[in-house]
Image: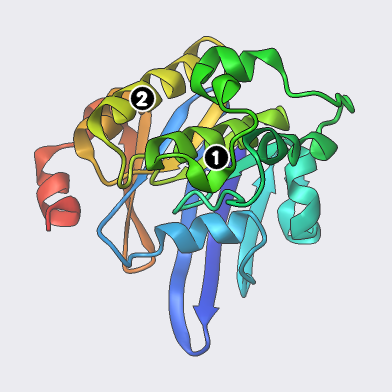
Amino acid sequence: MLSIERLNQYYGESHALRDLDLEVPAGQCTVLMGRNGVGKTTLLQCVMGLLPVRSGRLDFDGVDLLRVPAERRASLGIGYVPQGRQIFPLLTVEENLRIGLPARRDRLRQVPGFIFDLFPVLKEMLGRRGGDLSGGQQQQLAIGRALVLDPRLLILDEPTEGIQPNIVQEIGDILRRLNRDRGLTLLLVEQKLPFARRVGDRFAILDRGRSMASGAMGDLSEALVKEYLTV
């Protein structure tokens, strides 16, 4: 579904992504892994058009993303949950959720009911401001907001960061349901190895802006963990 070939990105003169290759197969959950500062978030922001790409190819289901402005990528069916959630704190939960509606291809004008089936707490707090929610509730809101646009690919940047353990468990259950019951393709950055192994079908490891290893999650060896993931 998402194919990245020989991608190069720079911050000024700093070469952040170096001839990076990544394949995200349709219907699977691919976990992007690596230590801090190796280019994981940078890669996601390139996919979403938030950072310029120097060279390479970004193909989403036959569409050249490098020719698509950032503001139109959501309407192609790409949902994005950024690191740090980035909900709108002064808007209500309902207003945050409704932001994704204009990007829907079917022009639906109300929040789909399955969002509240996944996150019942959001239905209870529709009138509450986003900034008044707990960290875990804000993360659920951020995921719900991305799902409102009915994506075919959902990209999540460290969805368990700073979240209490019971909500981490719940988010893991929801991602598995979205992937395995609804067939939603997932690409997520994740530092917690047990969580990655639980939800992921495939892994891809980055180091210093390069693709170092990838494959089925069951093939993630302890040698790779020690070399590229252990701090």
Residue closest to the eye, 167 or 209: 167
Query: Which image quadrant is residue 80 in?
Result: top right
Query: Which image quadrant is residue 173 in?
Result: top left
Residue 148 location, x and y as percent? Answer: 69, 29
In this picture, is 182 found above or below 198?
above
In this picture, is 169 found above or below 30?
above
Mark 1 vs mark 2, CA separation in Å: 15 Å
Residue 69 location, x and y as percent? Answer: 79, 60
Image quarter (top left, top right, bottom left or bottom right) of the N terminus: top right
Sequence order check, earlier mark of 1 and 2: 1
Query: Which image quadrant is residue 154 in?
Result: top right
Disc 1 versus disc 2: nearer the observer? 1
Residue 20 location, x and y as percent? Answer: 46, 60
Image quarter (top left, top right, bottom left or bottom right) of the C terminus: bottom left
**Residue visible at 52% across and 79% down in the picture:** 10
- Residue 40 shown left or right of residue 198 in the figure: right
Number of residues whose C-alpha sits closer than 10 Å to that of mark 1, classed few (under 14), some (14–19) or many (20 or more): many
Q: Pointer 2: what residue?
A: 172
Give amino acid for label 1: Ala
Residue closest to the eye, 79 or 123: 123
User: CB atoms at circles 1 and 2 under 8 Å apart?
Assistant: no
Residue 208 location, x and y as percent? Answer: 32, 69
Outermost residue on the bottom side: it is 13
- Residue 228 shown left or right of residue 109 in the figure: left
Q: State the SS at label 2.
A: helix
- Residue 223 shown left or right of residue 160 in the figure: left
Residue 112 in view of the camera: yes
Q: State the SS at label 1.
A: helix
- Number of marks present in the image shown: 2
Image mark for residue 142 = 1
In this picture, is 7 found above or below 61?
below
